[in-house]
Image (cartoon, rainbow, N blue to C red):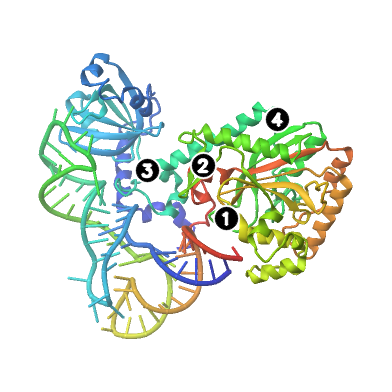
Amino acid sequence: MTDKEHGVTPEVDENRLIVERREKLRALREQGEAFPNHFRVTADAASLLERFGDADEWDQSALEERDEEYNLAGRIVSRRVMGKASFVHIQDGSGARFQLYLRRDDLPEGVYKAFKQWDIGDIVGVTGKLMRTRTGELSLHASGLELLTKSLRPLPEKWHGLTDQETRYRQRYVDLIVNPEVRETFVRRSLIIRGIRHYFDAQGFLEVETPMMHHIPGGATARPFVTHHNALDLDLYLRVAPELHLKRLLVGGLEKVYEINRNFRNEGVSTRHNPEFTMLEFYWAHADYNDLIRLTQDLLHRLVTQLPGMADGRVDYQGERIDFTGDYERVTVADAVVAHYDELSVDDVKNADRLREVCRAHDITVDDSWEWGRLLMELFEEGVEHRLLQPTFVTQYPIEVSPLSRRNEDDPDFADRFELIVAGREIANGFSELNDPEDQAERFRAQVEARDAGDAEAMHFDQDYIRALEYGMPPAAGEGIGIDRLVMLLTDSASIRDVLLFPYLRPESSE
RNA sequence: GGGCCGUUAGCUCAAUGGUAGAGCAGUAGGCUUUUAACCUAUUGGUUGAAGGUUCGAGUCCUUCACGGCCCA
């Protein structure tokens, strides 16, 4: 079983359905080119249905009068053979299904007989004219038909389809063939990303790409993946965030930049976490976090309303209606926590002992090394965050948990930072950037201390980043938006795996 | 990492500890406007893996693998 030969002789454990199809393929090879690539399409299913779908306007006589021939190519997804005539549905690249009417006497000699040997899953090219059947379905009356690709593996059953989650994720290609809503989700994902690019381009931001492989991981508090460069004999980290490189670009004079790309975090896998995920980050010189809040609200409003079915700016997510129109709520972390925990008052916000007491009273596990800022955040995340259903800007985060943010001028214990919470989840995180190199160096040192104390997520000291700041970074604001979570929200997906084409899964045990 | 649930034919699912089944798909035949087409016949199983209990295990026990949901 563990023998490697097992993998190179897959025939041994193939089921009879595949054996039968392989035999059919062998026969095709004997007859000539078994995988031809000469058929060219002149139409697609979705367009034909769009244009001629109306049964009143395009009845049989109107279609006959039009008398135009089309070439379609697609995968056979169902077939009903009735002696010397058959009905077949094909599904093509447009994602739609189209019915073919095949009649032995209307096809070239031998074609119909050959067709009867074909299988559901095979990809065919068909030539014919439009017709409307007795039951009113727009169909293509075939005058030519050929097999373009033989399918060796049977597709899931037509009625129940493929429902096994594991198979759907592992064999997404099959999921895409048989579950139309999967295709819709990923089309929508593409629309969302396109909309974001369009928005930032229109606002004068420059799209850039910064390294995915870092010598020093930074820009977020998270554990990195380690990889190795052989020629240089050097360990490298997959980036946890692009932030520090993007801010170097601000120093260099690229004052409005954005990047949409992958980040990698060495953490658990869950319905909300994938080891690699897509982030938008953007940086804007001579702006502060209030400008970001305005931009974020404008971006989301425009983005949502341009999506099919969401023109009114309202989104149904897991049974809850979320409204992206108007001004979103704003609340400071401290106010939100004090409002939620009756036993706390505004005077307790910086009282670590008091906060620790309340954490323990609510069964929140705390570390003795945490100061009031971290404790306050624990209380917020445990008690408040998941209750914020409608879009809410939560502002003024403790400096302790914001090592790259600018201090608030009135209360330097807090950062000029916000997170946008929607449906109980963080969607965006933005702040006025820290451009004081000496303060930044201090904060790096504090992170290094936390690392030495055992916090594997704490940041490293990035000397080159400090050097860049010492040249002078213009005052700026920067923000990250988690694309996967945003797509989940806008596609009503419960799991991040449903918005990733190939979510991470452990290797299959048989391999 | 912890708890609960799941893994049976290609797919979707059954099966008191007592002969592993159905529908679809497949195969053979019939059927020239069907649409979950229909009619007749029929093939198909290492019950996730390895141990154990038992006269007998898909079913009970242990370990492991993978997945789902919840929690951290």
Query: On what subunit does the disc labeled 4 rest?
Result: A
Which quadrant is home to the N terminus of chain A?
A: bottom left
Q: Which residue is drawn at 52% across and 36% down?
A: A313
Q: Position of residue B24 (x, y in %)?
A: 24, 48
Residue at the top extreme? A65
Q: Which of A319 and A56 is in front in this view?
A: A319
Query: Does A488 appear above or below A349?
Result: above
Are tags 3 and 4 found on a single chain? yes
> Which one is earlier in the sequence, the residue at label 3 or at label 2?
3
Chain to which mark 2 belongs: A
Residue assigned mark 2:
A490
Q: Nearer the viewer, mark 4 or mark 2?
A: 2
- Asked if marks 4 and 1 fall on the same chain, the answer is yes
Q: What residue type is labelled 3?
A: Val
Q: Is residue A500 visible?
A: no
The residue singled out by tag 3 in the image is: A178
Ranked by sequence position, the earlier of labels 4 and 2 is: 4
* Residue at the image point whose x is 33% and y is 46% from the top: A154
Q: Residue A40: percent from the left, percent from the top?
A: 39, 23
Task: Please tell me the numbered disc located at residue A126.
Answer: none
The three-letter amino acid code for the residue at tag 1 is Arg
Q: Which mark is residue A206?
A: 4
User: In the picture shown, does residue A365 fall above or below A48?
Assistant: below
Are labels 2 and 1 on one chain?
Answer: yes
- Distance between the Cα atoms at labels 4 and 1? 36 Å
Q: Mark 1 points at which residue?
A: A387
